[in-house]
């Protein structure tokens, strides 16, 4: 191995006591490949196993905590105990290859397709549709329903523990329900769950507290809890970089294991809210990096691109699309074969890459398409 890449391979012990062997993470990505009933397929299990031999940690595709929160076709479920054996298949496949397994859990809120949820009823913080033509108007959740969803996050965390995962990641990014409560675009409430920025923080922080409580009650060993967020929204009104700093300050005080920044481009800069020309990730790392580890992500393909990113001080780099293109990325760097890393998809190698057919069909039939970096 080239010595300049040594920082990639330093082990790390999180606050919870979970230890990872290196600083490379497989990012969560939608794969559309579960069974219609929400159980995982053999193809999905093999897909994760193929990518778990090199990275220190694998974060799964998002898993819905209630049937009303299902956001994608072919998404695996976590809203009933009957899903525990299914979830366990993925956790076991990842861990047998030497990586830690983290289950990303979420509720899609107003982003859910009506055809995927009971009675086609879409819910959110407020009755405000997402921007775009034909977007459904969600029903505003009641106080009782909000408290029930908070408990759903806790119950799915318990199932993750019973299924053998090393942790959960709360999906507070990409415009899903947790973010919808924090966003001034989607949350127009005037009760304890909305209004001021402090009240818009109430739901995200309540979910964190519930998940921490459940983990403390049910985990017999180290169990990590992370939180993923999108640093800004393009909508007006929408989350600004200044509001994101308030969010991460609050999250940093919750003694989480990590904060995971959802970015399409690692080096992207703020739209509004701060007078700072640095990349968002650098601002975030400076703000809370001494309190909680930060995971960065976003269009990093080569070893040198990842090295430049990690030299910002961000301790972990998540890779999504690159893990589909070259599942042996980490091994190649470790073995001094970084020049052999593949950075463009080879559409003749589905079997070798072990990509489930629904995901593969989406890749090959949509020019420039890749699964969203959840």
Image (spheres, rainbow, N blue to C red):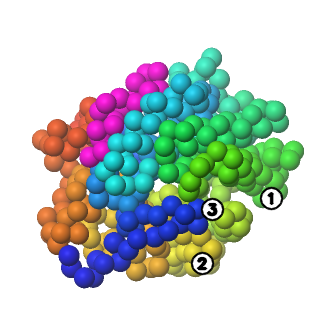
- Indicate which disc residue 290 carries: 2
45 magenta-colored: yes
Give the mark count.
Answer: 3
Q: Percent x, y for residue 242?
A: 67, 68
Task: Tell me the quarter of the picture where residue 93 sits.
Answer: top left
Magenta span of residues = 32-50
Mark 1: give few (<14), some (14-19) or many (20+) Cα within 10 Å. Answer: some
Mark closer to the observer (2, 1): 2
Q: Is residue 207 visible in this depiction of the protein?
A: no
Task: Return the disc, 2 or 1, that comes first in the chain's sequence.
Answer: 1
Say what secondary structure mark 3 lies in: loop
Q: Is residue 250 left or right of residue 275?
A: right
Q: Between residues 128 and 255, which one lies in front from this camera angle?
A: 255
Question: Pointer 3: what residue?
Answer: 256
Mark 3: give few (<14), some (14-19) or many (20+) Cα within 10 Å. Answer: many
Mark 2 vs mark 1, CA separation in Å: 23 Å
Say what secondary structure mark 1 lies in: helix
Quadrant, the N terminus: bottom left
Q: Residue at x 78, y 45 (%)?
A: 188
Looking at the image, the residue that sits furthest to the front is 220
Mark 3 vs mark 1, CA separation in Å: 19 Å
Q: Between residues 145 and 83, which one lies in front from this camera angle?
A: 83
Mark 2: give few (<14), some (14-19) or many (20+) Cα within 10 Å. Answer: few
Looking at the image, the residue that sits furthest to the bottom is 3
- Residue 115's place in the image compared with 92, above or below, is above
Q: Percent x, y for residue 61?
A: 44, 43
Question: Pointer 1: what residue?
Answer: 198
Q: Is residue 26 left or right of residue 244?
A: left
51 magenta-colored: no
Say what secondary structure mark 2 lies in: loop
Task: Tell me the quarter of the picture where residue 112 sits.
Answer: top right
Task: Tell me the quarter of the picture where residue 137 sits.
Answer: top right
């Amino acid at each position: 191995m080239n010595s300049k890449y040594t920082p990639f391979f330093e082990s790390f012990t999180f606050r919870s006591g979970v230890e990872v062997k290196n600083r490379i993470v497989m990012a969560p990505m939608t794969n559309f490949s579960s069974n219609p009933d929400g159980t995982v397929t053999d193809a999905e299990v093999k897909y994760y196993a193929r990518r778990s031999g090199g990275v220190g940690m694998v974060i799964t595709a998002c898993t819905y905590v209630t049937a009303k929160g299902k956001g994608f076709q072919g998404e695996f479920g976590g809203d009933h105990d009957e899903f525990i054996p299914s979830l366990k298949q993925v956790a076991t496949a990842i861990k047998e290859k030497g990586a830690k397994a983290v289950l990303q859990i979420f509720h899609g809120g107003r982003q859910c397709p009506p055809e995927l949820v009971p009675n086609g009823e879409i819910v959110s913080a407020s009755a405000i549709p997402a921007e775009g033509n034909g977007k459904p108007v969600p029903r505003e959740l009641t106080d009782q329903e909000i408290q029930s969803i908070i408990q759903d996050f806790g119950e799915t965390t318990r199932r993750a523990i019973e299924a053998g995962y090393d942790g959960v990641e709360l999906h507070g990014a990409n415009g899903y329900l947790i973010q919808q409560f924090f966003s001034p675009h989607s949350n127009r409430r005037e009760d304890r769950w909305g209004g001021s920025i402090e009240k818009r923080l109430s739901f995200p922080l309540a979910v964190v507290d519930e998940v921490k409580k459940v983990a403390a009650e049910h985990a017999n060993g180290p169990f990590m809890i992370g939180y993923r967020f999108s640093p800004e929204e393009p909508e007006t009104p929408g989350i600004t970089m200044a509001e994101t700093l308030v969010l991460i300050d609050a999250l940093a005080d919750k003694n989480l294991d990590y904060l995971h920044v959802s970015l399409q481009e690692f080096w992207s800069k703020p739209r509004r809210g701060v007078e700072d020309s640095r990349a968002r990730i650098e601002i975030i790392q400076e703000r809370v990096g001494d309190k909680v580890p930060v995971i960065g992500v976003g269009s990093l393909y080569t070893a040198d691109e990842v090295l430049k990113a990690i030299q910002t001080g961000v301790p972990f780099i998540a890779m999504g699309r690159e893990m589909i293109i070259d599942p042996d990325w980490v091994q190649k760097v470790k073995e001094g074969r970084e020049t052999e890393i593949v950075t463009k998809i080879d559409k003749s190698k589905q079997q070798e890459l072990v990509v489930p057919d629904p995901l593969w069909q989406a890749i090959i039939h949509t020019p420039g398409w890749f699964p969203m970096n959840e």
